[in-house]
Amino acid sequence: MKTFQDVNSLKCLQQPSRDTPFLPREWVQMYHKIEITRESDGAAIIVPCTSANFFLMDLNPVWYVDQLVKSGGNTLFILYLDTTNSCTDKCPMCFTALTRGLEGFQQSLQVDLALKRIKELRIRYPSTFRMVSLAGPGEPLNHKDIHTLIKGAHDLGSAVRVYTAGKRLIDETIRRTLLDYTKLIRVSIDASKEDTYQRTHGVKGLKERLVGIEKMVKEKVRCSNDTLIGMHFVIQKANMNEIVPFATLAKNLGVDFVVYSQETFGKVNGGFSKDDFEKVVHDLETVEMMHSYEFRTVVPHLVQRQTYTEFDKTHYSTPDVLNNCHNSKHRLFFGVQNDFSACWLATLDAKFRRESFIGMLDKDDTMASLYNVVENGVGSELTDGAQLSCKTCVAGNYNSMINQISHFLNNETHYTTRLIEHAPGNHSDSNYKFILKN
């Protein structure tokens, strides 16, 4: 097997074309920074940018920077669909459980309405809106019309990603839909043993999920499919001893990548002692060194996302500050109640959703307001003193990155962008700290 070090030592990876929205396979998770050089004076900056910034397995940063310059940063790149709030699991760590309870369970996105609006967005932002992501707040594959939704988004010219807990993968028709029409599938497993799985997911069924993944991997190989399949592990007290076994399990199943992240999104239980922390970091370093051309490993220091124990809801941001939220321009959410709220945290917390609520998706006025958010900023639409705090936003690093790029280029039209290859082994990062609450 060709190892990451072998690939890196060859120094033969051709930089991706600035005309291609998506990364070629050889660059997927093979970079961790980009370098931008101005032609006018030769000055250059190096910007950290990986999963939370350029969507990990998907968009090409060279193309992305060009689109930022051409649009002035006022454009849409990705749409997240909260397809349903019903779920197959009962994870104690679930950060959407409270919001789902307030909404009432069994809510589902209206497929024909969603596809109508996706078509309109593709027309308005044809150069940049290239991706639809199905994630939460429940299990997206629970939606009764999931095939129609995924195929429809694909047929409209959008690459589709799906984040799932994996129970429905045992269904051959579901697997076929995913392999035929999606670009990436990430399965949340969080354990390598059944008893640990029950503690992290609140239900039985690890073997069933793994069988579904194994079948999908074999079907992918058999039909020479290029869909990326990966597994996800949220590091918690209950599973901290299975970090390395999980990577070994994933590699043996034949998936393309594995992702580790810390408890996050304002629901952090902590409980890690100093010894726990040292063991977790050691094991993550072991996993990182498993990184190879065939099996990519993503550890927390590559995520570039801050972690908060709870969301701040008291330090309210001004409209000018809200207008500087590039994340809420570039990545929109359609809510499970067929609604749109402007703040990116709306899908994670009921207060942010309520304060940034714009309207229902069946109203054309809502779409007009959505366009205003994308092209002028959240603050331009929420001018009546919305009680929103940016102090603990998990997208803070993304906004800082966009500001850094915009300030550096500052109307420069001649520049080059190149990816800097990632070398494993640097497992610490000031932007991502474990919460050591005892």
Image (cartoon, grey):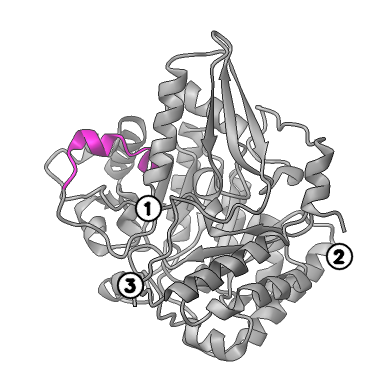
In the picture provided, is 267 more to the left or to the right than 254?
Answer: left
Q: For residue 320, what is the image quadrant?
A: top left
Q: Nearer the viewer, residue 78 or 118?
A: 78
Nearer to the camera, 328 or 414: 414
Considering the numbered disc 2 on the image, is that residue within a helix, a strand or a loop? helix
Report the label total: 3
Q: Which mark is residue 394?
A: 1
Q: Residues within 10 Å of mark 3 (few under 14, many from 20)?
A: many
The region drawn magenta spans 316-329
C-alpha distance separating marks 3 and 1: 20 Å
- Mark 2–mark 1 Cα distance, whole angstroms, equals 39 Å
Residue visible at 69% across and 72% down? 173
Q: Based on the displayed image, in which of its 4 quarters is residue 182 positioned?
A: bottom right
Residue plotted at (63% across, 62% down): 285
Relative image position of residue 31 (x, y in whole percent): 65, 42
| 32 vs 15: above or below | below
From the image, give the main secondary structure of the stretch colored magenta: helix
Q: Which residue is mark 2?
A: 222
Amino acid type, callout 3: Arg
Find numbered disc 3 in the image and state the secondary structure of the residue it sits on: helix
**Whole-percent x, y for residue 420 in the image:** 65, 36
Q: Quadrant of the C terminus?
A: bottom left
Which circle, 3 or 1, is nearer the viewer? 1
Q: Earlier in the sequence, mark 2 or mark 3?
A: 3
Question: Is label 2 in contact with label 3 (beta carbons under 8 Å)?
Answer: no
Can you identify the residue that label 3 sits on?
A: 100
Label 3 with label 1: CB-CB less than 8 Å: no
Q: Earlier in the sequence, mark 2 or mark 1?
A: 2
- Mark closer to the observer (2, 1): 1
